[in-house]
Each structure stands twice: as structure tokens, then as C-alpha cells.
Amino acid sequence: MPINIALCGIGGYAMLYTRYILDKNDPRICPVGVVEPYPQSCPRLGDLEAAGIPVYATLDELYAAHKVDLTVIATPIQFHTPQILTALKNGSHVLCEKPLCADEADIELLQNTAEEAGKFVFIGYQWSYAPATLHLKKDIGAGRFGKCLDMRTLVLWPRDLAYYRRGSGWAGKVAAADGALIYDSIANNATAHHLHNMLFVLGEDGKAAVPDSVHGELLRANSIENFDTCKVDLTFSGGTKACYIVSHAVDKVMNPSYHYRFEKADVYYSQTKNDLSMAIMPEDYTEYGEIVAVTADGERISYGNPFAEEYGKLEAAISAALRGDTREFPCGIEAASVHTRIINRLQKTETVKNIAENKVVRTEERVYVPGLWEALMECYRDPGRSLAEWTED
């Protein structure tokens, strides 16, 4: 028997799920409704109406009309906690887009409510559902590569002014007008996956590794409350170090790339092959788009493309709901909560600093900082470097 599924959010990134329910004809699911306060902004609204899928303004209206087995939430960060709680209290399993929530104070409430409801809450860090990542995590956990020595991640994604004008005024905000935390930033939104991934692959099954120390340099060039550029340094028990470097204020693209160094192997990933990515990858790394481990004795292990399963997280949630499985595996509240706690620590202990105005270029379409791309590349090569020279003070 198919499960009843509902979407909370149907535009923006939520279009991924909208396409699935409209185009996949998955016999395992019965779409009973969608929740969207501004449905006119969704280009597939006509298709939803033609399919007889009703649109509701709130989750309460949806649940008053339907029993829902799985609710998929893809809404702004500040709505995650109340919407997850509403879904759980109405007897629905949940797949919620990343991050888990804005305020770490909500984590225990979410955990307790899910346990009381007997329902799972999956968080949509898509790499955490990819066979390539799960295979790598398994090998790391089994000790195949020995101790992890250090990890480096780099994502440089330019964003224009329209990016910060999207939505209803929450983009780049620390908190809403009513005081509710948002913490929208490059580290808690567009590239959150890549900070979480370092934590996730080091953790036990269904968990993420918890760092002992967190230090960050948080910078902004755009006229926003929060930061658009950062370098975050983590230290784990046993001495493992990790460095996460990301920016929206650059003038060139560097798609996600990483190097995880172990005692017995080096693990590499770079999404795209071009002159820019080749500048930081070893010459013998040719499997662009795939995770590859190179062991000390020369063995090459290809884990595949972590982006290969576009709908992997939704497929996992559907399968778990069909089984009535309440385990939060592979990425539930516990695994996702580490990222949320790190973001909270950064926001509460580090100061967001302005990039020196004489270094910033402002046009009608975008804001960028010439030379910042190169500086962040150098930080990736040498994580000991600081970004202090780029700030006003």
C-alpha cells in the first residue's frame, strides 16, 4: 500500500521534490497535498492543480484534511523547528532540508518529540545518503586507512545580489524581526553540506564526529547581517584537524573539492575538472567527480560520484516510511545536530568582520573581492594562513 506524502515548500530548492512527485509516477507514494503560502511563485503550480494535489497555506490545514505518513520540508531555516514539531505531533515521519534547525536549544526538544512520536526525522544532507559517501564512511570507521590526520574542504561559489534578495527578507540574516534565530550564511546554507560531510564521514553509523575545538574567521563583503566568506578550523580528539574554506564573494568558481589525509591513504574529491581545480589536485587524480582513495602502497579505490543519486535522500525516506522504520539512519537529528552546534558556537563566539571596502567591487548585479579567490586557494594549500589582512581592522 502506498504511503501518503506531503510537501512543505514547493519552490526554490523544493522544486527537486515537486518534480519527483509530479514526474516520477512512484507507485509507493500518494501525494495528498502541498503547503505553500505563496504558490504563485512555483512554476509547476498548474501541474499540481492538474494532478489534483491540493495546496494549503499551513501545515495545520493540511493535517486537518489528511493523514500524512511522510512530510518533506524544504523551507527557510527559521521554520524548520516548528514545522518538524508540527509534523511529528500529527503522526508523520519527516525529511527536512538542511540544516536541522537554527537554534541549538531546539535539538533536545526535537529529539524527544521524535522519540515520543515514534517517527524518524531525516535531514537532507544529500551526500550522507549517497552510496559513495556511505562506502567511504564505512571504510574509515573500519580503520582501513588508519587515523585521520587532517581534512581540507574548499567551495568558492559566487552569488549575485538577487541571491540575497530572495525569499521574504531572511537571506543573510542572523535573526528574524521577532528574535527567532536564522543564522543564514554560506556555512549554514549553500555549502553546509561540505562542513557536515567532514563530520559525518568521521562519525560512527548514524552519527557525526564532534570536534573538541572550533575557531572561525567570518567575513562579509555583501551588505548583509551575517557572513558570506569564512575559514573554519576544527580539532578533534586524537589531534585530527579539519579546515573548511568557503566564499560567495569571489570572482571565480571552485566547485566542491576536498582532501582528507589519513595515516595509510589520501582521499580526494573535486567535482569539476578545469584549470582552476587542477591547481589544487594532485596530477594523478584524474577521476574528477568521483571520490578516490590512494593508499600508501599505491592502490586506488574509487567510491563513485556523491552526486549520482539525485533523489537519494527522498528515496531513503520513502523506503524507511514504508518499512515503518523509526531509526534515524543514515542522517537524522543526532548526526545533523553537530553541524548546528558548530554554527551556534561560531555565531556566539566569533565576530563577523567586514572585508576592507577598498578591496571590494560593487556593481548593480553583484559584489566581489578581486584576489580573494587566490587567497582562499592559498589557505587551502596552507591551512595555517589567516584572512586577517582582508578585513577592515
Image: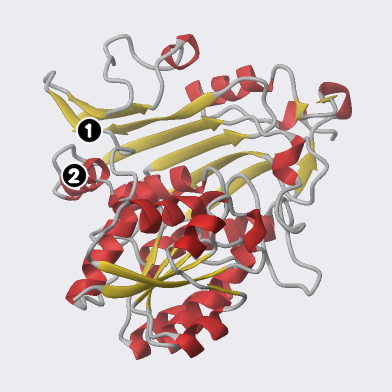
Which residue is located at x 42 percent, y 63 percent? Answer: 51
Which residue is located at x 46 percent, y 12 percent? Answer: 279
State how many labels appear.
2
Residue 263 visible in rendering: no
Label pair 1/2, CB-CB below 8 angstroms = yes
Q: Residue furthest front?
A: 50
Q: Which type of secondary structure does the marked residue at label 1 adopt?
A: strand
Q: Is residue 39 left or right of residue 148?
A: right
Amino acid carrying label 1: it is Gly
Q: Is residue 142 left or right of residue 286?
A: left
- Which image quarter holds the N terminus? bottom left
Q: Nearer the viewer, residue 348 or 317?
A: 317
Q: Nearer the viewer, residue 208 or 18?
A: 18
* Residue 320, picture quadrant: bottom left
Dot 2: within a 10 Å radius of its alpha carbon, few (fewer than 14), some, or many (20 or more) residues? Answer: some
Colouring rule applied to residues:
secondary structure
Amino acid carrying label 2: it is His
Which residue is located at x 22 percent, y 33 percent? Answer: 304
Dot 1: within a 10 Å radius of its alpha carbon, few (fewer than 14), some, or many (20 or more) residues? Answer: many
* Residue 6, picture quadrant: bottom left
Q: Indicate the position of residue 281 as horizontal and vertical percent values.
A: 38, 17
- Which residue is under mark 2? 135
Question: Looking at the image, is mark 1 or mark 2 earlier in the sequence?
Answer: 2
- Which residue is under mark 1? 304
Residue 201 visible in rendering: yes
Q: Indicate the position of residue 393 as horizontal and vertical percent values.
A: 84, 35
Q: Which type of secondary structure does the marked residue at label 2 adopt?
A: helix
Identify whether 290 is placed above or below 168: above
Q: Indicate the position of residue 19 as horizontal and vertical percent values.
A: 42, 51
